[in-house]
Image (cartoon, grey):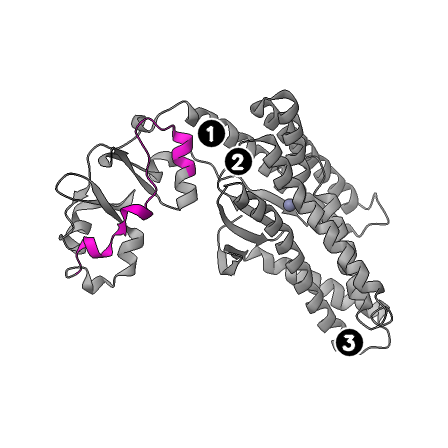
Amino acid sequence: MFRGNIRVGAVLGIPLEFNLSWLITLALFTFLLGDQVYPDVLRDEPAWFSWLLAAVSGIFFFASIIIHELAHSLIARRSGIPVRAITLFMLGGVSQITREARRPLVEFVMAIVGPLTSIALAGVFLGLAYAPGLRDNRTGVMWEWLFLMNLSLGIVNMAPGFPLDGGRVLRAALWGITGNYRQATRWASLCGRGLGYALIAGGFLVLLRVVPWLDPFSGIWLILVGFFLDNAARQSWAHTRLLEELRTRPASSIMQTVLPRVAPEVDLLQAMSRYYHPRDGMCAFVVDGDEHVLGMVTDVQLARVPRDRWPSVPVGAAMQPADEIATTTSGADLASVLEEMDGSQQTQLPVLEDGRLTGWVSRARLTGLFVPQPQVATSA
Ligand SMILES: [Zn+2]
């Protein structure tokens, strides 16, 4: 679902991405509004005006989703949880957070702030719809539509199925009451799966015109959201179990002890030919005479230097310096190693004892056990 993301910039320091599937939704909304909803209301206006208003509505609506996700992301960041990106895709947006909250209250606030933001936005749009001067204006119908969409976004996301916002609120509550994170996640995920199946069943009923007042087409949407939710709930539960398993194992159990060490004056080409590995990619640690790590060279640093200059650039000049590298220790558990990799976006971590290199862990070694990182989901 998240392949083919296009990064378009950043909001308040949080990268913003669009999945190509998002274009389907944008086209669909513009078409429905421009071809059907607005011409019905704006009978005296030319067709181009309905289309223009539809396009502007689409932009405002997706800005609303970004603001909803931004609310989740800002609380996450304030609570010390790094946010990798906000991603818009066919069914809405997700905040890609790199680890789960450590306390129920943080989870609760991080989850509920999204729907509350949508409801506040609905209030703003309702205000605009009824503002003197705008009320009888040709744009009034757009503000009303935006009010309804944001209100639905706030309400639908409070459905108590994990990993929807409401499911996260449910988990935080169960977790706070019982003190058992695992059981809270299990129950909230089961509610998420139940909700997913209910949506799929409801979608088929709509599709078969059992519910005559709903457009059969919206049945397809319900089925898609249902499948997405069931899948997301299963993955979230699998991720929780995986992290639990990883918490019982130390980094030393998978770390590689053949050390890719290189002196700072060695050139990039030489380092590459010695330490490039098809599975793990490039990984070399630049060390001084005392085995202290000065920096690290990976695919990222290689890509920054044009290939024809590799023989003349020393690794010491191209490396990521030690104070910017995330590191771990041999006794750290694998869940924290994974979180450290997600937070720093490094695919390799050096294992240090007293500043000296004793091993390294690559993401590829963890991939056999790896499932997607947690996401705060919104479906629209
Ligand atoms: Zn949300």
| Residue 42 at x, y percent in the picture | 84, 72
Residue type at mark 1 is Leu
Q: Residue at x 31, y 25 (%)?
A: 253
Q: Could you tell which of marks 2 and 3 lies nearer the N-terminus?
A: 3
Q: Position of residue 68 (x, y in %)?
A: 65, 51
User: Mark 2 highlights which residue?
Assistant: 100
Residue that carries the numbered disc 1 in the rendered image: 243
Alpha carbon separation for disc pair 2 and 3:
48 Å
Is label 1 in a helix, a strand or a loop?
A: helix
Along the line of sight, the residue nearer the viewer: 93 or 14: 14
Q: Quadrant of ligand 1?
A: top right
Q: Which residue is mark 3?
A: 47
Q: Which mark is residue 223?
A: none
Image spot of residue 208 (x, y percent): 79, 45
What residue span does the magenta drawing correspond to?
313-339
CB at mark 3 closer than 8 A to ligand 1? no
User: Is 373 situated above or below 49?
Assistant: above
**Do the CB atoms of the residues marked 2 and 1 lie less than 8 Å apart?**
yes
Which quadrant of the view contains residue 359?
top left
